[in-house]
Each structure stands twice: as structure tokens, then as C-alpha cells.
Image (spheres, rainbow, N blue to C red):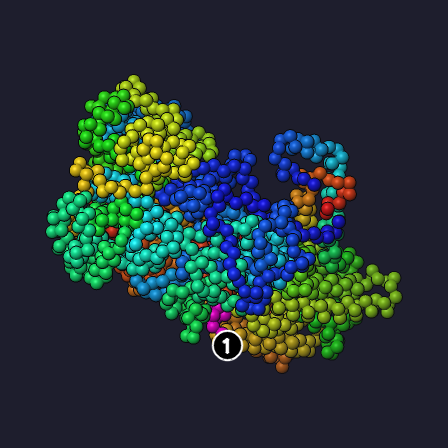
Amino acid sequence: MRRLEDLQNEFERAVFLAAYHSPRQRRRRHWAVLGLVAKHGLRGLAFSWPVYVLALAAVYGDTSHALAYLAVLLLAMGVSGMILIRGVRDDYRVRVQGRLREKTGHPGV
Amino acid sequence: MFEPRPQEPAYAFIPDAPHPETNRYGKPIETVPEGHALRGASLNINGDSSVGTNPNRYKQHGFYFSADNCIACHACEAACSEKNNLPAHIAFRSVGYVEGGSFPAYARMNISMACNHCDDPVCLKGCPTLAYTKFAEYGAVLQDPDICFGCGYCTWVCPYNAPQLDPVAGHVSKCNMCVDRLEVGLKPACAAACLAGALDFGVIETTHEHREQLETRLPGFPTPEITHPNIRFQQAKSLPREMRRTDSMPLRYVRDERHANVYTPTVAEDGRPRQWNLKKLRSREDPLVIFTLVSQAVVGAFLVLFLGPLFGVTMFAHAAHPLLHATLLLGLLGIETVALVLSTLHLGRPHRFYRAFNNLRNSPVSREVAGIAVFYNLLGAYTLFTAVPGLFAWLPRSLLELAVQVSGWGALLAGLAAIYFMSRIYRIPARPFWNHWQVLASFFGNVLSLGALTAGLAYLWAGDAGAGLAQTLALPVLAGLLLEGVGLAYHARDLTRGGGEGAASHYLQRTDFGYTYWARNAGLALSALMALALAWLGGGALSWGLLALLVFGTAIVGRALFYVLVVPTTMPGAFFWRNRGFERHARETGLADLPQMGIVPDAH
Amino acid sequence: MLFGRKQKNPIKIADVGVTKWEYTTCGYCSTGCSIEVGLDRQGRAVASRGVADADVNRGKLCIKGIFEHELFKSSGRGTTPLMRDSRLQAFRETNWDSALDKTGAEIKRIQSRYGRDAFAIISTGQIMTEEFYTLGKLARGVIGTNNYDGNTTLCMASSVSGYKRSFGSDGPPGCYEDFEHTECLLAIGSNLPEQHPIIYWRLKMALEKRKFPVIVVDPRVTMFAQMADVHLAITPGTDLVLLNSLAHVILKEDLADRAYIDAHTNGFDEFAALVEQYDPVSASRVCGIDADTIRHVARLYAKAGAAMTIWTMGINQSTHGSDGVVAINNLNLITGNIGKPGGTALSITGQSNAMGTREWSSCSGLPGYRYLESEADRKEVAAFWGIDAEFFPKQRGMFMTDILPAIETGQIKGLWLVATNPMTSMPNTPRIRKTLEKLEFLVVQDAYRDVETNEYAHVYLPAAVWAEKEGVFTNTERRVNLVRNVIRPPADAKPDFWIFSQLAKRFAGERKLPHFPETPEGAFEEMKQLSKGRMLDYSGMSYAKIEQQRGMQWPCTEGADSGTPRLYSDGKFQHADGKARLIPLPFIDNNERPDTDYPFWLNSGRVVEHFHTRTRTGKIGNLNKFSPTPYMEMNPDAARALGIAHGSYARLASRRGDAVVMVQLTQRVPRDMAFIPFHFHECVNRLTLGLLDPHSRQPAFKHCAVKIEPAPDQAAAARINAAARAY
């Protein structure tokens, strides 16, 4: 599948862009973003779930240090969020932007 | 396919010269035999699926460098940077030099070095993301910057400083042997650009026109035994007995009595004064200082907490102090999280952290990350089961008890394994200061001392522990400190005896950081004495707190020294370029702020 | 797959997307390499490569050439003309008409009030030959000032003077191909690997085919000296003594080519009488090279079937630079080594088109190697340009290094600088500052707005650089080579050719103007006509032929297919009697030698990654990073005695001023010498004296005395060092 940046000819670029901006392609890109967020979010969660134990402890368990637990939790969520955003942005740039999406819709192919 | 210039001259093409079946280390020069499955595949350069026409495509190629001829004109560096479109702060190929003699009997030997596409590439083995591949085509070792997440471990293990970590882009890249040029029979850009008949290229173990030697050693070049690099030298001119470096490394190279071409690296004691240099303790590796210390403390604290009841410290059982037990566990989980976050952010591209597991087979980094990940998960599980039991009220008691035991023992074993792998990361032949069993001793020493201190802090300060606790816990603290101390003592002795970059590191330890080094040693000794006193006489929260302060402070300084003092076996630099001392000076004085200095201003 | 199964990525190798390659010749040094500049789809210059079939460089480029395409986007370019009434005000942006009107008006005002010569012009060696020719037409034929010279006085004037005295005309007689035929090479004050790496490559290739002895004369142990068979570590400022002594040995041992001397030279007797005094033992006491070595080298040189000498700044930048060149010519004349393959006295030129200005700029005379002192020449050029021959002065005016003192004492009131930066390149920077302050009007024409001399300018004219315009350069071996216009100049910068033609129009009212062709090619046609039948014959050349042959060496007579590799092959020289002159050269030691107060020689020179005053190379990271800040080479034994550490800052002081540099300790320099690359502003030239050669008026940049001490406050020294330069 050709990318926009590979096309040199003005005519080819115009044809490509016409398809790229169509509602169908835009919809597919939105689904792709959702897929990427899910992928990176789940991946991140798989690696960092123990930190949410701190949240549980603040709620269900010993509440005397709840503030400390929440602080660490927020820090971890901040970092995870940053990693999520960067990961999604990176993948979007490499796999979605400037390409026409196939029917399968998965951003990994 | 790469297009040669119209009427490309003969010097730019790789000559077809006779070569033996195997290289001098016994490895066949033909990378894969006829009919092998890997033959005939396209290298897929920039998506081009064509296959090159080079008849020697499946032979190991390498550089041929005549140190007799190099004039340090930078043409090879420039050609490489231009072809690979590199910014000023990154260079795949660098020219440095060693010099010796006395005016006018002065000799300067220049060395141009990029990647040697080694037979045994330590970069490939060490990379946790498996970003490196040794191709059957030309034997080229190529790195993929898109897979790399910028940990920089390959830059540590390579003896020749081939991989380049770009702090701006957040990944590593390196010499790619100009495989696109090789596919059409052209030499790499650097070899084609050489203006003095110094740098050449061809199938390995071929002697080039007008040359007679196929040396593997050169003054300033690390021993080839580490990686079996695919580079051969000619160095026939007589050189002085001792060759010195112009960059800031305190090393010199002294000619071996028995072999004229072998120059042994030795310390160059230049009369520098003893200093503290506390500011220079900070470096790019600060997150690793924290990560290693914190992980060791957490594993140690868990060890002490979990095994405590087995050794008679009944107050560590969950039932004895459920609240404190849970709090300590949650605290451990919390600080380990912070440490992991720091360690992840240390990467050039933290959002690719999950790739660290790709090379469990070979990379100690992968194994350590896996170990820590398993430990963290199991610690999390154990904490969940013990600290938030309310969630599991619906489970039968025995099942919960089994889960607690399994996760506990699992976490303990995983944690200890992780620390072991952590120490293996630093057993790098190219970094002699680290390549000693002292790393293992220090790490496990810290596990014991820092761990016991942490557990003790929680119970002595927040709880109502009896006097006996300090006495009991002082024992593992003392054991840890002794283990570390013995390791360091042997380390100092072995470094001095071993010579080379290790001795140079030790020299820096005794001079640039001299006072800091002795302060650290004094700290260790003092804390061991204090621990002994506590073990004998017992103590309370205050004395325990003081001991903790002393031990933690010493540990931080010690770990920082560990990272900062390493003198790698990398190539000698020039006066400005590839001179760490000048780079640091440029950053301190603001010279680095101009983009055309080629120094990233804050590569902290 | 959502959870990512990896497939093998393609190997990514940088591809900047070149769609077209355009032919040019390098604009840095005078080796004259042919470079192709690669343009991408949007017409941006993104790559450079050597032209594979060019004879000069055969596809190779040095570090500066490899990154030359980065020039077009380097920082600090002039984008619009700037003007101000006094240098104490800020510049205000203006348009070309206003700037040129003001310039024209000021020139006319100064000339009418103080005389025609009260306005001086100093040009360069780095613009196109057609532009030199046009500037010469403007300067001599329109503005009419006799104080018109180029910065080649700082670099090649001694060679020009020496060639004129010995052979009757300027014009290096040899070529790079001579390396393939020579049997002995003597290199004096030349550091080919650092200054002309491609010429070094040509030499190295010749040596690999057939080894011959190489003798290098240099006070430092350069890489060239290391690669040589014999290195003569000469005492600074004594080249003439060595050369005279070599001649002494050759004559004494009867190794001279008597047949050649009798047939092609004059003045042998006086020459022999003078040289008699320079026996090796007496000479060795002055020049520091022992008598046996002198004899050995002399015999080697004379007995070789063909022997050649090359030299650059080590000979030229000296108080006996012209004599040094004449001495080399003497040496070659008495051994019959002129005009034959492998036998020549080849001056290696500095700037990319210093030859062009020597040939066509009319600085020292009239275009095409003509002389103001010759009535016939004046009449011929005046007729060609369509002006009155009486408008020309009857002899040449001041050299650049005399123009500046004339400004200092008020004889000259206005100055126009074209593509040169005397704030950094002239010796004794403090004196130059005071000089430039005195000008009533200074106009600076340069590609870079941040050129340091702009500090004193009243008008700044932004010019195009290198391949932003079209024209020819001539290199060291007389090869005329083409630079195609590859890209437009930025914003409102204009080619120097256009600027000269436009300024001429401002004088239309005053006098009858010569015709100024619209295009460089038109000027080239004029040059061809003016050169026909003369030594520097261009008449057989054309842009197309030059590009096709990758440069043609003059003389190339009309109808000839190619140029001529060597001059004087027939033994006929340019003096009236057709013979060369052997000139006796007594050595006068006119140098500021080290003494107890100032115990070190200060030597200056160049490094391969920089060119001149770094207005270009200082902006390109991949060049600048190898020498990003001023430094000094000093001997560790001397440094130890003074307590100076490697990598620290030292303060140097001379009878002119002081400077702060970073210290590099190396045994490559003698114990009583410090070497500083001259490229950096506010550095070595704050210390230099620059005594002038009597014939060529070229300054002795490599000889003066300094004292050295560790900078007392290292942090302050670092700050001073960083603050002295903007880039």
C-alpha cells in the first residue's frame, strides 16, 4: 500500500488525497486510533497492574496512608498516560497517517 | 538499487582478491554455503526487493586500515555522515589518534574506526530488543533504529564505540556497511573517500594492493579477543615505545617487549590532584543509580519480611502486625513503582519499553527486566492477597493461603534471580572497571543491608518493636556490608594488578574522586562498626535511623561512583571530537549551546 | 495484528531524494575539485559528490567539499541591503536602489573632495573570474581609483612577485600530473594533507605507483612531515638561507645543468657570487639544518632526472616571501627543472579563485596579465573598453597592506570590501579596528551578514555565495573550471556580477561607461578576446567545453581541443629577451625574533575542517565540530616549566595585544614555538605583527614573538573565549 510521502506526481497525490479525505477512510482511521489506544492501554496495564493495588489499598484496606498511595498511583498513571499517548502517536505516524486503510482495519498490518 | 556515478573510477569498486577458506579464528569466511535457505534473498533496502549483483555477497567483509598512511583529513568521517545524512552530534565513523616521541622525533598515529561487524557481536547479544541482526549478506551487523528503544546497552558493551546513542532522537544507530553500495560492488562511502590510501575494504583476510600486513592489533585498539572484529591493519612504521592520548582518558599504550605490534594499555598518571568532584557524580545514569539501589532494597526488604518468621522474627508475620505488614508491603510496591518508572524514562523511547523481553536468550538486560517484572507482579499479587484480604472473602481460606505462599515464594525467588541478572549486565569485557565479581558482591550486599534496614525502619519507627528487633536485623545488615567491603577490597587490588582501563578507572577513583572514594570507604567501615555495635548491644529507632542514613548515603555515593568511573576500552579520540573532557567543558561553559559545536547541550 | 506480530523491517538507509546533479567547481581552496551538487524534487541542494571523470579529483572530495551543499542554508546570510549613517547606529534595512545610490554618491563625494585615489577597493580570491573582470572594469574604467587590490596579497602575492621577477610573468608553470613523473619532491612550507588533501591524494597515488623521495621543510612535525622521507625542521624565517645553501652545494659540486643555464637564463655570474657565501656550515647556524643534510638534499634534488618543488604559505607569508619564491625558481632553473614533466616550481595556491583575480581583476595591472606601466597595454585595454586611455594611471597603486595604513593616517577616506574579512584575516587586529573607525564610508559586500568586518560598515550589500551564481574559477594548475548556477540566492541577495554592473550605472552621468555584459558568459567572451595570443589564452574555451572536459588548463588557443599542461616547456620565458632571470638574494633577517621578554615564536596556519575566517565553515556543524574553539599547539616540555596543563586556557601576549586560547600539548611543535590556527576571530591576529615583504607587501603571519602564561582565572578565560565569537 503506497504512502502519501512516496508519491511525487501531483496528479497521483491529488487522487490519493481525494480517497484519503473521504468519509469512509476517515471512519477507518478513527477505528484505527481506537484500536491503537486499546492495544497500548492494555499492554501498559499488563505491565503496571500492581500499582493499582495501591488504589485498592487506599479504598478497601488500610486508609491511614491513603494519600501516599494515591500520590504514587497518580504518578504512575501520569507516566502510563504519557507512554500511552507517545506510543499511540508513534504508531499512528508510522502505520496510519498518510496511508489508505484496508477493510481489515487493524492498524498493525 | 544504489546508482554508481557515471564513469565511477576503479578505486571505488571492491577488488576481487584471493582469500583463505576460514578466517584466522577458524570461522568460515563464506557466511552461508551454497544452497542454503538464506541465499538469494533481497536485503529489502528502503523497500526495494531487488537482489544485489555482487558475486561475493555471501562472504564476510571487513575494513582494512593502514595506520601508516592515515593523515586524519576527516574525509572518511565526512563521507559517512553525508551519505547517512547525520546531524553534527552523531557520527558513525570517527578518527582519533595516539602520539608519541619528542620533537622532532614525534609520531602521530591516526585511527579511523566505525563498526567492525564482528564475528561475535556483543551488541547483538546484549540488545534487549533484538534490534541487531548479523546478515548472511557480507556478514554485516545491522541495527534497526525503529525497533530500538534507546537503552544504550549496546554502547556499553561495544569495545569500539560503534553504536551511537542519539539523545535527541532517542534511539541508537550505527554504521551499516553501506550495504546498498556493496550490493552493486562499490566500497562503502568512507573507504571510497579516503584520500591517503589508509582506509580500504574487501573480503576479510585479503591483503590489499601495495600492502603486506594483516594485523589485528594496533596501539589504542582494544584486544580483538572480545568480539573477533572484522578489521585488519597495516602498521609497519616504527613507533615510539609509548603512545599517548590527547583526549581526557588517563591511558597510555606501552609497547610489549615480545611483540612489536602489541601495545598494552596502561594508566597514564598525569599528576592530577585529589578532589571531591561531588558535582560530577551526577550523570546520564542517575536513574539507574536509583533503580538498582531501590530494587535491591525492595528485594532485600521483602526477603527479610517474608523469611523473618522462619528465622524467629515472629513480629514479621502478617498476623502479628497486619496493618504494619500491609503498609510496608504497599510502601515497597510504591517505591518499586517509582524506581521502575525512572528506569523506563531512562530509555530514549520509553513508550517502547515492552520490547525489553525480546532477547531473553542472550541479553542479560532482557533477563533482568523479565526477572524484575515477574518479581513486581508477584509482589503485587502477594500484597493484594495479604493487604487487601477483604477482596478475597469469597475464596476458601486454604486457597487464599496457597496463593499467598505461592506468590510469596515466587516473588522471593524471582527477586533474587533478578538481582543476579542485574549484576550480569555489568560483566562487560569492554568495561574492565565493571567486569569483576565485586558487582555481584555489592548488589547482594546491598540486598541484605538495604533490605534489612528498610524493613527495620518500618517496624522500629512506625511500630512498637521490642529491643531485640534491632539486634536481630543488624546481623543481615552487617553481613551485607561485609560482603560489599570484601568485594571492593578485592576489586581495588585486582584493578591495580590488571592494568589497562581498569587501572585507569582506579586512578580516577583515587584522584578526581579521591576524597569521595575514601569518604565512601570510611562510611562503609563506620556503618559496619555501628551494625556490629547494634548486633551486640541492641538499639532503638533512633540508632537504627542513623545507621540507615549512613548506609543509604554511602550506598548512593558508591553506586554513583560505580557508574561515573568506568573507563571503557573505546577508541582514542581527538582533541575536541570524541573527547569527553571537552564535551563536558563545552556544556559547563555554554559553548555547547551553539548547534554547530556538535555537542547536545544537556545530554544528562 | 492488534497485539503486534513482528515482521522483518526493511533496512533503512538514508536517501535524500536527489533527482538531478549539477556541475560545479569547489569554492574553498584552489585545488579546484569538480563537485556535483544533488538537488531534490523541490530544488533544494541536499547532497554533494565528486565528479568521477574529472582529472583533478577523480571523484574524490575532502571534508569541506563533501558538505559544501550545506552552505546554501548556513546561518548568518545577508538577505537584504543594510544602511546606516554612522557605525554607532543600528543598521536599517533598505532596498538595492537606495544602497547602490548611496554607495555611488559617497564614492563620488569622497573622490571629488579628496581625490580619485581617496576611495579604495579591496577584493578577494573567492568570486568568479567574470566578476573579477567586471570589478576591474568598474574600478579602473569607471571609478578610476588606483588604490585597488585584493586579499590575495595576504596569501599569494609573494608567489606572484617571485614568478614575475624570475620568469617575467605570473603563472604557475606546473600541474598535478607532474607528481607522476617527478623523481624528487621538495615541499617547503606546505602542509598538503591539511590544506590541499586532494592534491595530497594525487601525490600519494603517484608514490604508490612509483616511489620517489619526498623532502618536507616545516618547523612543525605535520602529517606531511611524518609521511616524508626527510623532514627539515627549519628555524622560522630562514627559508632563503636554506635555499641559497642548496644552490651553493649544487654549484660547488658541479651538479647544475649548465646547458639549460646558458640557453635559458641571465644573471648567472652575480647569482653564483652571492650563493658562494651560503656554504652549508654557515647556513646551518642560521637555518638550523645541519650541513650534511643540506648537502644530501641538494645532491638528491640536482641528480634527479626531474625534480619539483611545491610551496604554500610557509614561503609566501614571510618578510622574504618573494625572495623565497625567486630562490626556488633559481634552484629549479639551475637544475633545468622548469617546464618538463616532473620538473617544476609549482606554487600551490590558496583561495579557489586567487588565480582568477591575478589573471583578470586588474588589481596589480590590467586584465589578462597586462601592465599599467606599459603604454601599449593601456591603449589596448582602453580601446577594448571604449574609454580614454589617459584615464588609467601609469603605474599600479597601493597593495592592500599599504592601503590600510593609508586609511589609518587619513590619505584614504572610503573603502569597499568585497568578500573579504580583514577584521579576522589581517595581522594586528587592534590596529585594524582603529583603522576602520577612521573611514568616512565603508561598504561591505559579502554573503554573510555576520562577517565581523560589518561592525564598521555603513552599507552592507548581501551577495550570493558560490553556486548561487555562474562563472569560472582557475585553480593552482591553471585549470579554468565551471561553476553552474545551482540554486537561487536567498531573499534579496544578488550575485557580485550584478552588483558591479548596477553600481557602474550610478556613474553614467560622469563619464563614458564601458559596456557591461548582461551575463557572466558575456564577460567570459570579452575575456577570451582579450586573452587571444597571450600566455593566458582562453580563446579556445567555452562553458560547454569546460564542463565537458571538467576544466581546461590555459593556454588554450583558439581552435585547440584541450588546454596545455605546462608552461615554458620550450624554455622561452616572458621577459623581453625570452630568458629567465637568476637573481642574487642576500638574506636580511627582518623578523621579530623571540627574546627574553617574549620567548616563543608564534606560528599560525590552517586546519582542514575550516576555511579562512570561518564565515562559512563555522556555521556547518559537521565541519566546525572538529575545531569548534580556538586552540594552541604547545610543546609539553615548555608548558610544564610554565605550569600550563593540557586542555586548560592560556593567555598569550605580544607587543600588539593579548589573546586567550585553549591549550593542546603535543610534541609536534618545537619547544620555543606556539602554533595557532588563524581561522578564529579575535584570536591569533590580536598578537601578530605582520611585517611586510618589500616586493610583494605580503605580511609575515608566521613570525613574531609572544609570551605565554596560564590564564589565572580559568573560568573567566572560558567566558572570554566563548564571548569573543558569535559562531
What residue did someone put label 1 on? B493
**Residue at 43% of width from left, 75% of height from top?**
B258
Q: Does the magenta segment cover residue B570?
A: no
Q: Nearer the viewer, residue A7 or C444?
A: A7
| Picture layout, residue C465 above or below residue A84 | above
Could you tell me which chain the residue with mark 1 belongs to? B
Residue furthest out toward the top: C509
C723 to the left or right of C251: right
**Residue at 31% of width from left, 57% of height from top?**
C213
Q: Position of residue C117 (x, y in %)?
A: 22, 29
Is the stretch drawn in magenta largely helix, strand or loop? Answer: helix
Q: Tell me which segment is drawn in magenta.
A: B498-505
Q: Would you identify the image quadrant in which residue A76 lies?
A: bottom right
| Picture layout, residue B361 above or below residue C222 | below
Q: Position of residue C76 (x, y in %)?
A: 43, 38
**Residue at 40% of width from left, 58% of height from top?**
B69
Q: Position of residue B512 (x, y in %)?
A: 45, 66
Q: Nearer the viewer, residue C683 or B403?
A: C683
Density class for disc 1 (Cα within 10 Å; few <14, some 14-19, many ≥20) is few
Is residue C188 in view from this perspective?
no
Residue type at numbered disc 1: Arg
**Residue at 45% of width from left, 55% of height from top?**
B577
Q: Position of residue B387 (x, y in %)?
A: 77, 64
Is residue A93 in view from this perspective?
yes
Q: Does the magenta segment cover residue B502?
A: yes
B157 to the left or right of B577: right
B355 to the left or right of C715: right
Q: Nearer the viewer, residue B427 or A45?
A: B427
Q: Quadrant of the C terminus of chain C?
A: top left
Q: Would you identify the image quadrant in which residue B57 lies?
A: bottom right
